[in-house]
């Protein structure tokens, strides 16, 4: 696809020139610093993540945690549009081997969070 860009980097080290480039960003079952960043509101994670999105851009998270640091996202002009349990079909569509290792299913549910970038910071 001509409009897809793949970058191999930690979110904390994303190149500045990627600012405002994304209409959409998706994170499925993060771990390590990325998971801590979205659940605890780490500025070193959220600032570059928000910087990727253009105004009106959307961020989708699918993770096992049932809550994220919404107030920290809002400080970066990312407004929560949706929070709900993920369906089995959504988890399957992620094709995440990490979700399988976590045992995501009825006893260990996943959650979908959708944010929209409302303006530049």
Image (tube, helix red, strand yellow):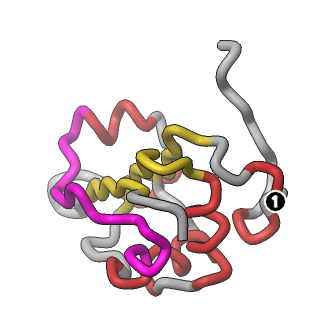
Q: Nearer the viewer, residue 12 or 104?
A: 12
Q: Position of residue 23 (x, y in %)?
A: 51, 38
* Range of residues picked out in magenta: 73-89
Q: Label 1 neighbourhood size at 10 Å, few (<14), some (14-19), many (20+)?
A: few
Q: Is residue 100 visible to the viewer in this orientation of the structure?
A: no
Left of 19 or right of it: where is 65?
A: left
Left of 27 or right of it: where is 7?
A: right
Quarter of the image where one finds residue 66: bottom left
Is residue 84 shown in magenta?
yes
Seen as rendered, the residue at the extreme top is 1
Q: Nearer the viewer, residue 31 or 84?
A: 84
Residue under the point 52% across and 45% down: 25
Residue 20 to residue 15: above or below: above
Residue under the point 67% across and 81% down: 44
Is residue 85 shown in magenta?
yes
Quadrant that contains the C terminus = bottom right
Quadrant that contains the N terminus = top right
Seen as rendered, the residue at the extreme front is 120
Residue under the point 38% across and 76% down: 74
Instruction: For mark 1, give the secondary structure.
Output: helix
Residue receiving disc 1: 16
Q: Position of residue 109 (x, y in %)?
A: 22, 59
Q: Position of residue 88 (x, y in %)?
A: 21, 40
Q: Nearer the viewer, residue 10 or 79?
A: 79
């Amino acid at each position: 696809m001509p409009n897809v860009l793949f970058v191999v980097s930690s979110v904390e080290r994303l190149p500045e020139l990627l600012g405002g480039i994304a209409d959409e960003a998706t994170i499925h079952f993060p771990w390590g610093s990325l998971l801590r960043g979205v659940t605890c509101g780490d500025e070193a994670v959220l600032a570059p993540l928000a910087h990727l999105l253009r105004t009106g851009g959307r961020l989708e998270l699918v993770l096992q945690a049932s809550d994220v640091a919404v107030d920290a996202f809002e400080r970066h002009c990312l407004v929560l549009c949706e929070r709900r349990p993920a369906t089995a079909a959504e988890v399957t569509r992620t094709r995440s081997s990490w979700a399988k290792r976590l045992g995501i299913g009825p006893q260990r549910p996943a959650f979908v969070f959708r944010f929209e970038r409302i303006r530049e910071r």
